Image (tube, rainbow, N blue to C red):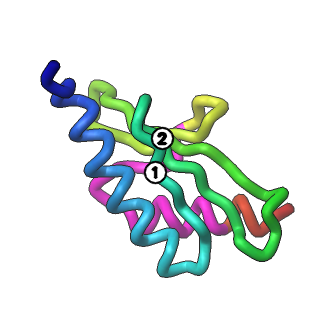
């Protein structure tokens, strides 16, 4: 059965974000079904978050597990910086 094109799009955008997060020293694990990114600080495993990717009227966005938008997928570096700030508050 062929994969859903939206799932490929989500996986692509989440992989871009994972690369940015890893450059900031965070751990980012891409889960396949449904595509989500599990993000954690390797030094503080208790601080972890799940980020997904959704299409909205204005384009594709990264989104926190509680539904708030992180940022546009066209700006993965900016989204990664926001995630780093949130995880470092703990």
SS of the residue at dot 2? strand
Whole-percent x, y for residue 72 in the image: 36, 49
Q: Can you tell which mark lies on residue 30?
A: 1
Quick check: marks 2 and 1 in contact, CB under 8 Å?
yes
Q: Is residue 89 left or right of residue 86?
A: right
For residue 6, what is the image quadrant? top left
Q: Tell me which label, 2 or 1, sits earlier in the chain.
A: 1
For residue 90, what is the image quadrant? bottom right
Q: Nearer the viewer, residue 21 or 82?
A: 21
Q: Which residues are magenta?
A: 69-84
Whole-percent x, y for residue 61 in the image: 38, 41
For residue 15, what is the image quadrant? bottom left
Q: Is residue 89 left or right of residue 31?
A: right
| Residue drawn where x is 54% and y is 69% of the image | 81
Q: Nearer the viewer, residue 60 or 49?
A: 49
**53 relative to 47, above or below:** above
| Residue drawn where x is 16% and y is 19% of the image | 1
Quick one: label 1, few (<14), some, or many (20+) residues within 10 Å? some
Whole-percent x, y for residue 33 in the image: 42, 31
Q: Nearer the viewer, residue 73 or 33?
A: 33
**64 relative to 73, above or below:** above
| Residue drawn where x is 47% and y is 43% of the image | 31
Whole-percent x, y for residue 87 in the image: 73, 61
Q: Nearer the viewer, residue 42 or 80?
A: 42
Q: Can you tell which mark lies on residue 36?
A: 2
């Amino acid at each position: 059965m062929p994969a859903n094109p939206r799932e490929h799009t989500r996986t692509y955008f989440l992989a871009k974000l994972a690369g940015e997060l890893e450059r900031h020293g965070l751990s980012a694990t891409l889960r396949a079904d449904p595509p989500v990114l599990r993000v954690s600080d390797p030094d503080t495993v208790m601080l972890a978050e799940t980020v997904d990717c959704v299409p909205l009227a204005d384009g594709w966005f990264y989104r926190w597990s509680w539904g708030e938008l992180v940022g546009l997928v066209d700006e993965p570096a900016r989204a990664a910086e926001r995630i780093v700030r949130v995880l470092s508050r703990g």
